[in-house]
Amino acid sequence: MSSSSPNTGREVHLASRPVGEPVAGDFALVEVEVPAPGPGQVLVRNRWMSVDPYMRGRMRDVPSYVPPYAVGDVLTGGAVGEVVASRADGLAEGDLVLHGGGWREWWVGDADRATRLDVPAGVSPSAFLGVLGMTGLTAYAGLVEVAALRPGDAVFVAGASGAVGSVAGQLARLKGASRVVGSAGSPEKVRWLVDELGLDAAFDHHDGPALEQLRRVAPDGVDVCFDNVGGAQLEAALRVLRPHGRVALCGAISTYNDESGGDPVHGLGLAVGKRLTLRGFIVGDHEHLRPRFLEEVGGWLADGALRVRETVHEGIERAPEAFIGLFTGAGGGGKVLVRL
Amino acid sequence: MSSSSPNTGREVHLASRPVGEPVAGDFALVEVEVPAPGPGQVLVRNRWMSVDPYMRGRMRDVPSYVPPYAVGDVLTGGAVGEVVASRADGLAEGDLVLHGGGWREWWVGDADRATRLDVPAGVSPSAFLGVLGMTGLTAYAGLVEVAALRPGDAVFVAGASGAVGSVAGQLARLKGASRVVGSAGSPEKVRWLVDELGLDAAFDHHDGPALEQLRRVAPDGVDVCFDNVGGAQLEAALRVLRPHGRVALCGAISTYNDESGGDPVHGLGLAVGKRLTLRGFIVGDHEHLRPRFLEEVGGWLADGALRVRETVHEGIERAPEAFIGLFTGAGGGGKVLVRL
């Protein structure tokens, strides 16, 4: 099979809907024929694909903001690849594109569903699946718009070593937060947050009750909580938030394998007297921020103010394992990607 | 003791901080000397005083948006009375005033801490402690500003027969909600909500799980929840709220006798995908709405569009009982007042 004229390619199908934590048997690697692109279409050789926690929700057969994946069908998700054949104006062979046809080696689709990428010098194309893509925009929108971050605010990022959290913590600092603290799942990640990403303090959530840990690193309270975790860490945040504090509810990875909407949260009654705002959001509602986001975050990435860690798995056959690792904390932190 | 020259009067002191539900022994009725008003002060014969759930929080010795009551000292709260002596410009004998020196028969204080009332024909002065006072403004601010009610929204008022809830439900209807449903604590209150206040449907929270009940009365979901209850009713609301739904967290009477910040709330994770906003508020932050509120709500009260129920206890010695009844559901619904 040559890069320019494939006959077949491999893709990952949803073999069965996971019950609780996803396992390898929920996925199937399938060899399929790759069609030739039709009029207005392109054939893309995928180079990178993203695995994201939100995909767990799509594996469930319930109505949500995105339709569920179908059992027996190929999965989808963000991918970056190279156009190897084009029957569309505006995209030519050799162009790098971002599109939603991940979980497969080759993608054939309408050119208007792919975005041509201008990759700045020194930046990996994979950044468009992470810090310069949906992941980074999620962090940006959550801080800037949902939590209405103001210079001088103290910020707690729950789940600060993950793909979104590691950008959110750094953005809070770069946007003038007075203090940024975070939580992670290992001593190594805690060191990374403080030593490399520049957070003021961080804690390992295995080290004791979240409230004790958070009070230790944020003794004067916080104004903003960027929550990727839910459960006990969100409860701790409700306790330490100052009056008029804001919580951006970005996701609750502790709950994605749980049908009930997550662990119960104690202390929500505190939101009344403290006039707290808790707001759930999904990045798709904040697309209008993208130009500002690319300019600001692209600048910080180019000048080194913003650091990125990627955990890279090699080969489509490793994609299920990469995805499963999101929930076990097995990864090294930062953005999890599969290189194809 | 004549109305115009008292020597002594009775007032209610906090004898001890309640543990759990307040009991009679937490209060003491004390006879005290009534001082003559100093320069700039007025002497007021209180006619009505308010008992409110928020006062339970002030009986606890914790920092909050209002300072705690002191053990052994007189309680405070909203009252309406008649000026019987004035050493201040702008207030004269015979004026009716609203002020914060409740829980006592006579109040002596600075005139600038009292508001002269123009009581419209057909309206009881007690309305300024209820529908035209803090209670009504709370309902108005919660709907209009905190929950950003829009015409066509479907609304659920949790605790719809209480002082604030009974105004909130009617205001939602008058402001163009497509459907208004509520919960209450007895079949009689449920009938009152539907037959007299004009709610589309209501349920008795004793009749079964809140989620089942709420799904029955709001089968198509709701856009706004005005929450006075917390706990299971708030959980039910999280389930039935539509995308972009808003929750005004006004208080959680189910939690006020509980030190932990209330019952745990399940399902907060649903707020992410549904992009829900939950916002705690206190009325004092929304004082700027008062002119609009008085015009709109005063008009609806005058023309009969808005109905009011008062549960009136007679005599200062009944004030503790009136307050305790707020938490036991013993009252008849609507605003609870003490006539002095």
Image (cartoon, coloured by chain):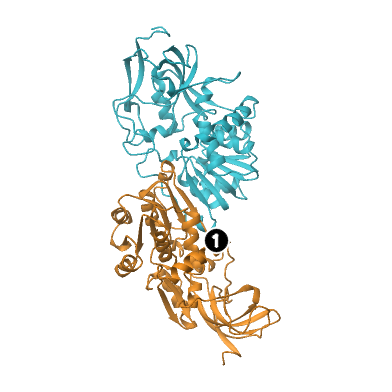
Chain colours: A orange, B cyan
Left/right of residue A24 with respect to residue B188 in the rendered view? left
Point out residue B179 in the picture as x, y percentages from the top left corner: 63, 43
Residue occupying the far bottom of the picture = A1
Pick the residue in front: A195 or B18.
A195
Point out residue B4 in the picture as x, y percentages from the top left corner: 42, 8
Left/right of residue B218 with respect to residue B82 in the rendered view? right
Pick the residue in front: B111 or A37.
B111
Residue that appears at 42% across and 17% down: B315
Query: Badge 1: how crowded within 10 Å, few (<14), some, or many (20+)?
Result: some
Point out residue B122 in the picture as x, y percentages from the top left corner: 60, 19
| Figure check: B215 above or below B316 | below
Asked whether residue B162 is in view, the answer is no
Residue that appears at 47% across and 62% down: A139
Residue that appears at 35% across and 29% down: B23
Residue hosting label 1 = A289
Left/right of residue A325 with respect to residue B116 in the rendered view? left
Point out residue A116 in the picture as x, y percentages from the top left corner: 59, 76
Asked whether residue A215 is in view, the answer is yes
| Figure check: B140 above or below A308 | above
Residue that appears at 55% across and 80% down: A81
Check disc 1 and give the amino acid type.
Leu
- At mark 1, the secondary structure is helix
| Figure check: A84 above or below A67 | below
Image quarter hosting the N terminus of chain A:
bottom right
